[in-house]
Image (tube, grey):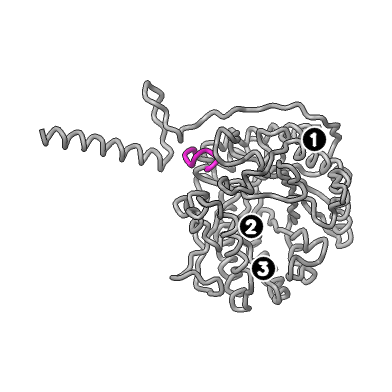
Amino acid sequence: MKKGILIVVGVVFLIIVIVAIMFVFSICPPKGPWPTPPWCGKDFTRYTYEVDANPSSISQIKAVNMYDTWGRNYNMGMVETTQANIESSFERVKKLGAQEVYVHDFDRAIYDGKTDYKSTGYTFVDETFWNDFRDQSISNDELKKLVDAAHSRGMKIGIKRNIAFVNIGNFILSGIKGNISSDVEKDYKEFNNYHSEEWIRDFFKKWQDRLVEKGKIYQEIGIDSMSISPQFQNPTFVGHEELANQLWKNLIAELRSNFKGKIVVDLDVYGFVDGKNGNEDWKKYDYYKDADIVEVRIYKILEKYQSSSQNIKDDIKKMIDELDLKAKEIGLKISVFFAPSSYKNGLYKGPVEFLDVRNQNIKNLEKDYNEQVIGFDSFFNAVKDKTNIERINMGNFAWDDALDPEVKPKISISAGFRNKPAENLIELWFLK
């Protein structure tokens, strides 16, 4: 009797181990009478829409920015992987008419002992899924698949980098109460409260070493462009702008000797149009002129261009006209990244943490696909004849067709356009 129980327990344990291994490595069994594991793919509803637009030819380079996630896709219950959707997603991006596609990789600061945002006692490491059940760094094998998938479709591929100084994994449990956004924002403000000269020099040494290491890999694999600007939780350098400017220049020069593709930098949109973002004086920066691609990121109509009547078309035109004029004044060709959200008044309020599904404020937001369409259409009409804007980068394109209520995240209000009417709108303009 005991022997029989032990055999049953052993078999059950073996099955659990096999399933766990299949889950971790995304292994799918052959089709058969047994159920298909959830990580082996799920067919979400694919929507097509008729949109009201009168597109005309645009001269800028047309790019698409993939959603900044990698690994087990939390859109789908953290089971299916983004890796499984490389080919299908890039095929969809190509059919839009894109010439370039951008993908995000991930870096995380690991502190020695207790987290101290003023300390230099940290190192940059690859992000892991198990840290926060969200994102992980892209492996070299995955990079090769991305390059092959893009190049085989006639598209160039660029890599951007998301950096995390604040460990969002610490707030996943608090997110049950709907506090992910506010908790992370609070710590991020503390992190960027002040950086000493010692901290800044140390950061640039570590960041430069990290980028040179990645640049060598990208060069060998065939990546066409890479960004040096950390996104998500980028540090600011208030009071030390001249120092930071020179260190950025040094970093670009060093990277060029290891990576022959194009170097991308972010030009802060508020720093560009106002000269400052908060207390950081962008008039003291010009390092971005040493790069090959200078991108200005826009997630909403900036406050200074928001009219009392909230006329989306006119407000976007004013904003794009000034960006073009500013670029002309300093003799710069810029790229514009544009990612409007798809909830009511989202073009004026900006993106939200749509994963914060237990947050009542998020629950109360009403999706508005038409506003997102109007935003993109107004953007295209405003940018089509601008000679100082050389590239338009449409954000963001998800790795799957998942939308709520099929999945828990409230993707319908996000700054993503896949499987929404805006995807059809962008295709009309890109292919004109």
Distance between the Cα atoms at labels 1 and 3?
A: 36 Å
- Helix, strand or loop at disc 3? loop
Q: Which residue is mark 1?
A: 429
Distance between the Cα atoms at labels 1 and 2?
A: 28 Å
Q: Which residue is mark 2?
A: 231
- Please state if 72 lies on the left or on the right of 386 as rendered: left
Q: Residues within 10 Å of mark 3 (few under 14, many from 20)?
A: many
Q: Is disc 1 in contact with disc 3, using a CB cutoff of under 8 Å?
A: no
Q: Quadrant of residue 383?
A: top right
Residue at the image point whose x is 57% and y is 65% from the top: 187
Q: Amino acid at mark 2?
A: Gln
Q: Which residue is mark 3?
A: 236
Q: Is disc 2 in contact with disc 3, using a CB cutoff of under 8 Å?
A: no
Coordinates of residue 427 in the picture (x, y in percent): 75, 33
Q: Is residue 286 above or below residue 409?
A: below
Residue at the image point whose x is 17% and y is 34% from the top: 7
- Please state if 274 lies on the left or on the right of 152 as rendered: right
- Helix, strand or loop at disc 2? strand
Q: Is residue 350 above or below residue 116?
A: above
For the residue pair 58 and 362, the one nearer the viewer reads as 362
Q: Amino acid at mark 1?
A: Trp
The reply to whether residue 78 is in sight is yes
